[in-house]
Image (spheres, rainbow, N blue to C red):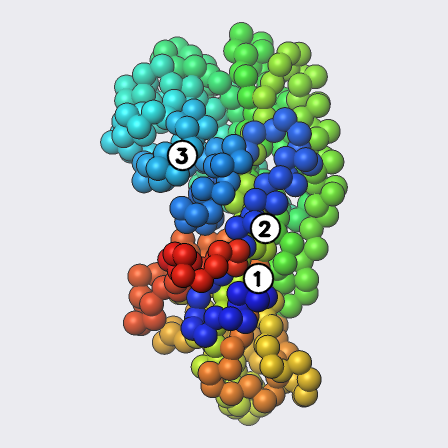
Amino acid sequence: MAAALAAATEDRIVYDLAGIGRSLDTLRAELPGVQVRFALKACPLDEVLGVLARRGAGVDAASPGEVEQALRAGVPAGRVHYGNTVKSDRHIAEAYRLGVRTFATDSAEDVAALAVHAPGARVFCRVATGGAGAVWGLSNKFGCPPEDAVDVLARARDAGLVPAGLSVHVGSQQMTGEAWHAAVDDLGDVLRALDRRGIRVDHVNLGGGLPALGYRDRRGALLDPPLDKIFRVIREGTDELRRVHGGPLDFVVEPGRHLVADHGAIRAHVTRLAERRGAGGERQYWLYLSCGKFNGLYEMDALQYPLHFPGHTAGPRVPAVVAGPTCDSDDAYSHEEGLVRVPAALASGDPVWVLSCGAYATSYTTLGFNGFAPLPHAWADRPEGTGADG
Protein backbone atom coordinates (compact mmCIF):
# COMPACT_ATOMS: atom_id res chain seq x y z
CA MET A 1 0.00 0.00 0.00
CA ALA A 2 2.76 2.46 0.94
CA ALA A 3 4.59 1.75 -2.31
CA ALA A 4 1.44 2.35 -4.37
CA LEU A 5 0.72 5.61 -2.57
CA ALA A 6 4.31 6.77 -2.99
CA ALA A 7 4.28 5.95 -6.69
CA ALA A 8 1.09 7.92 -7.34
CA THR A 9 1.68 11.39 -8.78
CA GLU A 10 -2.01 12.34 -8.94
CA ASP A 11 -4.84 12.07 -6.43
CA ARG A 12 -6.51 8.67 -6.23
CA ILE A 13 -7.85 6.14 -3.77
CA VAL A 14 -5.80 2.97 -3.54
CA TYR A 15 -7.19 -0.37 -2.37
CA ASP A 16 -5.25 -3.38 -1.14
CA LEU A 17 -7.30 -6.22 -2.59
CA ALA A 18 -5.15 -8.89 -0.96
CA GLY A 19 -5.68 -7.21 2.41
CA ILE A 20 -9.44 -7.23 1.89
CA GLY A 21 -9.29 -10.93 1.13
CA ARG A 22 -7.25 -11.56 4.27
CA SER A 23 -9.80 -9.67 6.35
CA LEU A 24 -12.52 -12.00 5.12
CA ASP A 25 -10.38 -15.04 5.90
CA THR A 26 -9.68 -13.74 9.42
CA LEU A 27 -13.36 -13.00 10.03
CA ARG A 28 -14.31 -16.54 9.06
CA ALA A 29 -11.65 -17.95 11.37
CA GLU A 30 -13.07 -15.89 14.24
CA LEU A 31 -16.68 -16.81 13.47
CA PRO A 32 -16.52 -20.35 12.06
CA GLY A 33 -19.61 -21.52 10.26
CA VAL A 34 -21.15 -18.04 10.06
CA GLN A 35 -22.10 -17.01 6.53
CA VAL A 36 -20.73 -13.68 5.31
CA ARG A 37 -22.85 -11.33 3.21
CA PHE A 38 -20.77 -8.26 2.25
CA ALA A 39 -22.63 -4.97 2.72
CA LEU A 40 -22.05 -3.78 -0.83
CA LYS A 41 -22.88 -0.14 -0.05
CA ALA A 42 -19.58 0.15 1.86
CA CYS A 43 -17.46 -0.26 -1.27
CA PRO A 44 -19.40 -0.88 -4.50
CA LEU A 45 -16.39 -1.63 -6.70
CA ASP A 46 -16.48 -4.68 -8.96
CA GLU A 47 -12.88 -5.60 -8.18
CA VAL A 48 -13.51 -5.61 -4.42
CA LEU A 49 -16.70 -7.58 -4.84
CA GLY A 50 -14.90 -10.05 -7.09
CA VAL A 51 -12.22 -10.76 -4.47
CA LEU A 52 -14.88 -11.50 -1.87
CA ALA A 53 -17.11 -13.48 -4.24
CA ARG A 54 -14.25 -15.75 -5.27
CA ARG A 55 -13.79 -16.58 -1.60
CA GLY A 56 -17.44 -17.55 -1.30
CA ALA A 57 -18.89 -14.45 0.32
CA GLY A 58 -22.41 -13.38 -0.50
CA VAL A 59 -23.94 -9.91 -0.69
CA ASP A 60 -26.31 -7.88 1.43
CA ALA A 61 -28.09 -5.85 -1.26
CA ALA A 62 -30.33 -2.84 -0.72
CA SER A 63 -31.62 -2.26 -4.27
CA PRO A 64 -32.07 -4.07 -7.57
CA GLY A 65 -29.00 -2.23 -8.81
CA GLU A 66 -26.87 -3.84 -6.12
CA VAL A 67 -28.41 -7.23 -6.87
CA GLU A 68 -27.46 -6.86 -10.53
CA GLN A 69 -23.90 -5.86 -9.63
CA ALA A 70 -23.53 -8.86 -7.33
CA LEU A 71 -24.76 -11.25 -10.03
CA ARG A 72 -22.39 -9.72 -12.61
CA ALA A 73 -19.50 -10.30 -10.19
CA GLY A 74 -20.33 -13.99 -10.01
CA VAL A 75 -22.22 -14.11 -6.71
CA PRO A 76 -24.96 -16.74 -7.04
CA ALA A 77 -28.48 -15.44 -6.46
CA GLY A 78 -28.76 -17.84 -3.53
CA ARG A 79 -26.02 -15.92 -1.74
CA VAL A 80 -27.73 -12.55 -2.22
CA HIS A 81 -30.41 -11.31 0.13
CA TYR A 82 -32.37 -8.08 -0.03
CA GLY A 83 -31.47 -6.58 3.33
CA ASN A 84 -33.27 -3.25 2.98
CA THR A 85 -36.61 -3.11 4.79
CA VAL A 86 -37.53 -0.05 2.70
CA LYS A 87 -38.49 -1.12 -0.82
CA SER A 88 -41.18 -0.29 -3.36
CA ASP A 89 -43.44 -2.80 -5.05
CA ARG A 90 -41.43 -2.33 -8.24
CA HIS A 91 -38.12 -3.02 -6.52
CA ILE A 92 -39.46 -6.13 -4.82
CA ALA A 93 -40.67 -7.49 -8.16
CA GLU A 94 -37.38 -6.65 -9.89
CA ALA A 95 -35.24 -8.32 -7.22
CA TYR A 96 -37.49 -11.38 -7.33
CA ARG A 97 -37.17 -11.50 -11.13
CA LEU A 98 -33.38 -11.43 -10.72
CA GLY A 99 -33.55 -14.52 -8.51
CA VAL A 100 -33.50 -13.13 -4.98
CA ARG A 101 -35.64 -15.25 -2.69
CA THR A 102 -34.74 -13.90 0.78
CA PHE A 103 -35.95 -10.48 1.90
CA ALA A 104 -35.74 -8.40 5.07
CA THR A 105 -38.91 -6.92 6.48
CA ASP A 106 -40.12 -5.02 9.54
CA SER A 107 -43.77 -4.10 8.87
CA ALA A 108 -47.12 -5.58 7.95
CA GLU A 109 -47.31 -3.33 4.89
CA ASP A 110 -44.01 -4.63 3.54
CA VAL A 111 -45.11 -8.22 4.19
CA ALA A 112 -48.27 -7.65 2.18
CA ALA A 113 -46.24 -6.26 -0.73
CA LEU A 114 -43.81 -9.17 -0.60
CA ALA A 115 -46.68 -11.66 -0.72
CA VAL A 116 -47.89 -10.10 -3.98
CA HIS A 117 -44.60 -9.37 -5.73
CA ALA A 118 -42.33 -12.10 -4.32
CA PRO A 119 -44.73 -15.00 -3.75
CA GLY A 120 -43.34 -17.78 -1.58
CA ALA A 121 -40.22 -15.80 -0.67
CA ARG A 122 -38.28 -16.28 2.53
CA VAL A 123 -38.45 -13.31 4.89
CA PHE A 124 -36.46 -12.36 7.96
CA CYS A 125 -37.70 -9.71 10.37
CA ARG A 126 -35.34 -7.00 11.55
CA VAL A 127 -35.53 -6.40 15.29
CA ALA A 128 -34.73 -2.83 16.36
CA THR A 129 -31.75 -2.09 18.60
CA GLY A 130 -30.81 1.00 20.57
CA GLY A 131 -27.46 1.52 18.85
CA ALA A 132 -25.66 2.53 22.05
CA GLY A 133 -21.88 2.27 21.77
CA ALA A 134 -21.74 2.77 18.01
CA VAL A 135 -20.38 5.77 16.14
CA TRP A 136 -23.53 5.62 14.00
CA GLY A 137 -26.44 4.18 16.00
CA LEU A 138 -28.91 3.32 13.18
CA SER A 139 -31.69 3.11 15.76
CA ASN A 140 -34.58 4.97 14.12
CA LYS A 141 -35.28 4.08 10.50
CA PHE A 142 -35.14 0.28 10.57
CA GLY A 143 -36.53 -2.56 12.61
CA CYS A 144 -39.49 -3.19 14.85
CA PRO A 145 -39.69 -3.86 18.61
CA PRO A 146 -39.09 -7.49 19.60
CA GLU A 147 -42.73 -8.04 20.51
CA ASP A 148 -43.86 -6.84 17.06
CA ALA A 149 -41.44 -9.12 15.21
CA VAL A 150 -43.54 -12.13 16.16
CA ASP A 151 -46.66 -10.60 14.62
CA VAL A 152 -44.78 -9.60 11.47
CA LEU A 153 -43.54 -13.14 10.89
CA ALA A 154 -46.96 -14.60 11.70
CA ARG A 155 -48.43 -12.33 9.04
CA ALA A 156 -45.76 -13.53 6.63
CA ARG A 157 -46.70 -17.15 7.29
CA ASP A 158 -50.39 -16.42 6.82
CA ALA A 159 -49.63 -14.61 3.54
CA GLY A 160 -47.90 -17.65 2.06
CA LEU A 161 -44.36 -16.45 2.70
CA VAL A 162 -41.72 -18.43 4.59
CA PRO A 163 -40.90 -16.89 8.01
CA ALA A 164 -37.23 -17.79 7.75
CA GLY A 165 -35.32 -15.67 10.23
CA LEU A 166 -34.57 -12.70 12.41
CA SER A 167 -31.98 -9.95 12.09
CA VAL A 168 -30.46 -7.10 14.07
CA HIS A 169 -27.99 -4.31 13.44
CA VAL A 170 -26.19 -2.98 16.52
CA GLY A 171 -24.97 0.20 14.82
CA SER A 172 -22.12 0.97 12.47
CA GLN A 173 -18.60 0.99 13.95
CA GLN A 174 -19.89 -0.60 17.14
CA MET A 175 -17.32 -0.15 19.90
CA THR A 176 -18.66 -2.53 22.55
CA GLY A 177 -19.33 -6.22 22.98
CA GLU A 178 -22.29 -5.39 25.19
CA ALA A 179 -24.32 -4.27 22.17
CA TRP A 180 -24.25 -7.78 20.69
CA HIS A 181 -24.96 -9.29 24.11
CA ALA A 182 -28.12 -7.17 24.43
CA ALA A 183 -29.14 -8.05 20.87
CA VAL A 184 -28.76 -11.76 21.60
CA ASP A 185 -31.00 -11.37 24.66
CA ASP A 186 -33.70 -9.74 22.52
CA LEU A 187 -33.36 -12.34 19.79
CA GLY A 188 -33.68 -15.13 22.36
CA ASP A 189 -36.93 -13.62 23.63
CA VAL A 190 -38.30 -13.45 20.08
CA LEU A 191 -37.30 -17.05 19.34
CA ARG A 192 -39.18 -18.23 22.44
CA ALA A 193 -42.27 -16.23 21.46
CA LEU A 194 -42.12 -17.55 17.89
CA ASP A 195 -41.92 -21.10 19.19
CA ARG A 196 -45.09 -20.54 21.19
CA ARG A 197 -46.78 -19.47 17.94
CA GLY A 198 -45.54 -22.56 16.11
CA ILE A 199 -43.02 -20.63 13.97
CA ARG A 200 -39.55 -22.14 13.56
CA VAL A 201 -37.05 -19.94 11.76
CA ASP A 202 -33.87 -21.38 10.27
CA HIS A 203 -31.39 -18.51 10.61
CA VAL A 204 -30.42 -15.37 12.51
CA ASN A 205 -28.71 -12.46 10.76
CA LEU A 206 -26.44 -10.59 13.19
CA GLY A 207 -26.10 -7.71 10.77
CA GLY A 208 -23.21 -5.30 10.37
CA GLY A 209 -21.45 -3.14 12.90
CA LEU A 210 -18.10 -4.93 13.13
CA PRO A 211 -15.60 -2.08 13.50
CA ALA A 212 -12.58 -0.96 11.54
CA LEU A 213 -9.38 -0.45 13.53
CA GLY A 214 -7.70 2.61 12.03
CA TYR A 215 -10.09 5.47 12.84
CA ARG A 216 -9.67 8.34 15.27
CA ASP A 217 -12.57 10.03 17.00
CA ARG A 218 -13.53 13.66 16.43
CA ARG A 219 -11.00 14.78 19.02
CA GLY A 220 -8.21 12.80 17.43
CA ALA A 221 -8.01 9.92 19.92
CA LEU A 222 -7.50 6.49 18.38
CA LEU A 223 -10.69 4.44 18.37
CA ASP A 224 -9.73 1.10 19.88
CA PRO A 225 -12.63 -1.35 19.65
CA PRO A 226 -12.28 -4.54 21.74
CA LEU A 227 -12.46 -6.77 18.68
CA ASP A 228 -11.42 -9.97 20.49
CA LYS A 229 -14.19 -9.44 23.04
CA ILE A 230 -16.72 -8.67 20.31
CA PHE A 231 -15.93 -11.92 18.51
CA ARG A 232 -16.13 -13.86 21.77
CA VAL A 233 -19.54 -12.37 22.59
CA ILE A 234 -20.82 -13.23 19.11
CA ARG A 235 -19.55 -16.83 19.34
CA GLU A 236 -21.13 -17.24 22.76
CA GLY A 237 -24.31 -15.62 21.47
CA THR A 238 -24.67 -18.04 18.59
CA ASP A 239 -24.31 -20.95 21.01
CA GLU A 240 -26.93 -19.43 23.31
CA LEU A 241 -29.42 -18.83 20.51
CA ARG A 242 -29.06 -22.40 19.26
CA ARG A 243 -29.74 -23.60 22.78
CA VAL A 244 -32.85 -21.40 23.06
CA HIS A 245 -34.04 -22.50 19.63
CA GLY A 246 -33.57 -26.14 20.46
CA GLY A 247 -32.47 -27.14 17.00
CA PRO A 248 -30.33 -26.28 13.98
CA LEU A 249 -29.91 -22.55 13.43
CA ASP A 250 -27.70 -20.88 10.83
CA PHE A 251 -26.06 -17.48 11.29
CA VAL A 252 -25.21 -14.64 8.94
CA VAL A 253 -23.17 -11.46 9.34
CA GLU A 254 -23.13 -8.42 7.04
CA PRO A 255 -19.72 -6.73 7.39
CA GLY A 256 -18.94 -3.66 5.34
CA ARG A 257 -16.37 -1.26 6.78
CA HIS A 258 -14.77 -4.06 8.81
CA LEU A 259 -13.58 -5.68 5.59
CA VAL A 260 -12.56 -2.65 3.54
CA ALA A 261 -11.95 0.48 5.63
CA ASP A 262 -8.38 -0.23 6.70
CA HIS A 263 -7.41 -1.47 3.24
CA GLY A 264 -8.13 1.76 1.39
CA ALA A 265 -6.14 4.99 1.45
CA ILE A 266 -6.25 8.22 -0.52
CA ARG A 267 -3.24 9.88 -2.08
CA ALA A 268 -4.28 13.54 -1.92
CA HIS A 269 -2.32 16.79 -1.83
CA VAL A 270 -2.16 19.97 0.20
CA THR A 271 -4.17 22.83 -1.21
CA ARG A 272 -2.96 25.32 1.39
CA LEU A 273 -1.83 25.62 5.00
CA ALA A 274 -3.14 28.99 6.10
CA GLU A 275 -2.99 30.99 9.30
CA ARG A 276 -6.13 32.95 10.12
CA ARG A 277 -7.58 34.87 13.02
CA GLY A 278 -10.68 33.57 14.74
CA ALA A 279 -13.65 35.64 15.80
CA GLY A 280 -12.01 36.28 19.17
CA GLY A 281 -8.70 37.28 17.63
CA GLU A 282 -6.99 33.98 18.37
CA ARG A 283 -4.59 32.49 15.83
CA GLN A 284 -5.85 29.47 13.92
CA TYR A 285 -4.23 27.21 11.35
CA TRP A 286 -6.31 25.65 8.62
CA LEU A 287 -5.04 22.81 6.43
CA TYR A 288 -7.02 22.60 3.21
CA LEU A 289 -6.71 19.29 1.35
CA SER A 290 -7.63 18.34 -2.21
CA CYS A 291 -10.20 15.83 -0.91
CA GLY A 292 -12.87 16.19 1.75
CA LYS A 293 -16.45 15.41 2.63
CA PHE A 294 -17.75 15.48 -0.92
CA ASN A 295 -14.99 13.55 -2.71
CA GLY A 296 -13.85 10.71 -0.50
CA LEU A 297 -14.13 11.66 3.18
CA TYR A 298 -17.89 11.84 3.75
CA GLU A 299 -17.67 10.59 7.33
CA MET A 300 -15.30 13.35 8.46
CA ASP A 301 -18.08 14.92 10.52
CA ALA A 302 -18.03 11.87 12.83
CA LEU A 303 -14.38 10.84 12.93
CA GLN A 304 -10.84 11.73 11.89
CA TYR A 305 -8.87 9.77 9.34
CA PRO A 306 -5.16 9.37 10.14
CA LEU A 307 -2.96 11.58 7.95
CA HIS A 308 0.59 10.86 6.82
CA PHE A 309 2.80 13.51 5.23
CA PRO A 310 5.63 11.88 3.26
CA GLY A 311 8.67 14.09 3.13
CA HIS A 312 7.80 15.82 6.41
CA THR A 313 8.98 13.33 9.03
CA ALA A 314 10.76 15.98 11.12
CA GLY A 315 10.36 19.63 11.97
CA PRO A 316 7.82 21.63 13.99
CA ARG A 317 4.10 20.95 13.84
CA VAL A 318 1.11 23.19 14.37
CA PRO A 319 -2.49 22.39 15.44
CA ALA A 320 -4.78 22.81 12.45
CA VAL A 321 -8.38 22.42 11.42
CA VAL A 322 -8.40 20.01 8.47
CA ALA A 323 -10.81 20.86 5.67
CA GLY A 324 -11.63 19.83 2.14
CA PRO A 325 -11.44 22.02 -0.95
CA THR A 326 -15.09 22.91 -1.55
CA CYS A 327 -16.96 26.10 -0.82
CA ASP A 328 -19.03 24.45 1.91
CA SER A 329 -18.51 24.97 5.63
CA ASP A 330 -19.43 21.36 6.43
CA ASP A 331 -16.39 20.22 4.46
CA ALA A 332 -14.09 20.19 7.52
CA TYR A 333 -13.29 18.43 10.77
CA SER A 334 -15.12 20.38 13.43
CA HIS A 335 -12.59 22.82 14.90
CA GLU A 336 -14.65 22.85 18.10
CA GLU A 337 -13.98 19.15 18.59
CA GLY A 338 -10.31 18.58 17.78
CA LEU A 339 -7.31 19.82 15.87
CA VAL A 340 -4.72 17.81 13.97
CA ARG A 341 -1.02 18.47 14.42
CA VAL A 342 0.46 18.95 10.95
CA PRO A 343 3.92 19.92 9.67
CA ALA A 344 4.39 23.69 9.77
CA ALA A 345 6.41 23.54 6.55
CA LEU A 346 3.59 22.13 4.38
CA ALA A 347 3.32 23.79 0.99
CA SER A 348 0.66 23.71 -1.71
CA GLY A 349 1.04 20.54 -3.78
CA ASP A 350 2.72 18.44 -1.09
CA PRO A 351 1.35 14.88 -1.02
CA VAL A 352 -0.68 13.63 1.91
CA TRP A 353 -1.90 10.10 2.55
CA VAL A 354 -5.33 9.72 4.14
CA LEU A 355 -5.43 6.30 5.79
CA SER A 356 -8.24 3.89 6.74
CA CYS A 357 -10.73 5.50 4.36
CA GLY A 358 -11.63 2.48 2.24
CA ALA A 359 -15.24 2.34 3.48
CA TYR A 360 -17.80 4.62 1.83
CA ALA A 361 -15.11 6.71 0.11
CA THR A 362 -16.46 5.81 -3.33
CA SER A 363 -20.15 5.26 -2.57
CA TYR A 364 -20.70 8.60 -0.81
CA THR A 365 -18.72 10.67 -3.32
CA THR A 366 -20.71 13.29 -5.22
CA LEU A 367 -20.70 13.43 -8.98
CA GLY A 368 -18.56 16.55 -8.86
CA PHE A 369 -19.76 19.05 -6.26
CA ASN A 370 -18.14 22.45 -6.88
CA GLY A 371 -16.36 20.93 -9.85
CA PHE A 372 -14.18 18.59 -7.77
CA ALA A 373 -14.31 15.27 -9.58
CA PRO A 374 -14.62 11.88 -7.88
CA LEU A 375 -11.31 10.22 -7.17
CA PRO A 376 -10.14 7.48 -9.54
CA HIS A 377 -9.28 4.21 -7.87
CA ALA A 378 -6.26 1.96 -8.18
CA TRP A 379 -4.98 -1.28 -6.69
CA ALA A 380 -1.97 -1.73 -4.48
CA ASP A 381 -1.43 -5.29 -5.66
CA ARG A 382 -1.84 -4.86 -9.41
CA PRO A 383 1.01 -3.74 -11.68
CA GLU A 384 0.84 -0.55 -13.72
CA GLY A 385 -0.50 -0.92 -17.22
CA THR A 386 -2.93 -3.75 -16.44
CA GLY A 387 -6.15 -1.82 -15.90
CA ALA A 388 -5.16 -0.54 -12.50
CA ASP A 389 -7.16 2.66 -12.57
CA GLY A 390 -10.94 2.90 -12.29
* Dot 1 alpha-carbon crowd within 10 angstroms: few under 14, some 14 to 19, many 20 or more: some
Residue sticking out furthest to the left = 90
The quarter holding residue 354 reads: bottom right
Provide residue 192's location: percent of width, then percent of height. 62, 16
- The residues bearing labels 1 and 2 have C-alpha atoms spaced at a distance of 9 Å
Provide residue 295's location: percent of width, then percent of height. 40, 65
Q: Earlier in the sequence, mark 3 or mark 1?
A: 1
* Dot 2 alpha-carbon crowd within 10 angstroms: few under 14, some 14 to 19, many 20 or more: some
Tell me which residue sits at (69%, 36%) in the image.
30
Residue 19's mark?
2
- Left or right, 328 with respect to 91, comes to right
Secondary structure of the residue carrying tag 1 is: loop
Disc 3 marks which residue? 74
Residue 1's mark?
1
Residue 59's mark?
none
Secondary structure of the residue carrying tag 3 is: loop
Provide residue 165's location: percent of width, then percent of height. 51, 21
Give the amino acid type for the residue marked by disc 1 in the picture: Met
Q: Is the C terminus in the top left, top right, bottom left or bottom right quadrant?
A: bottom left
Q: Are marks 1 and 2 in contact (CB under 8 Å)?
A: yes
Tell me which residue sits at (42%, 33%) in the image.
75
Can residue 1 be seen at all in this image of the molecule?
Answer: yes
Q: Is the N terminus in the top left, top right, bottom left or bottom right quadrant?
A: bottom right
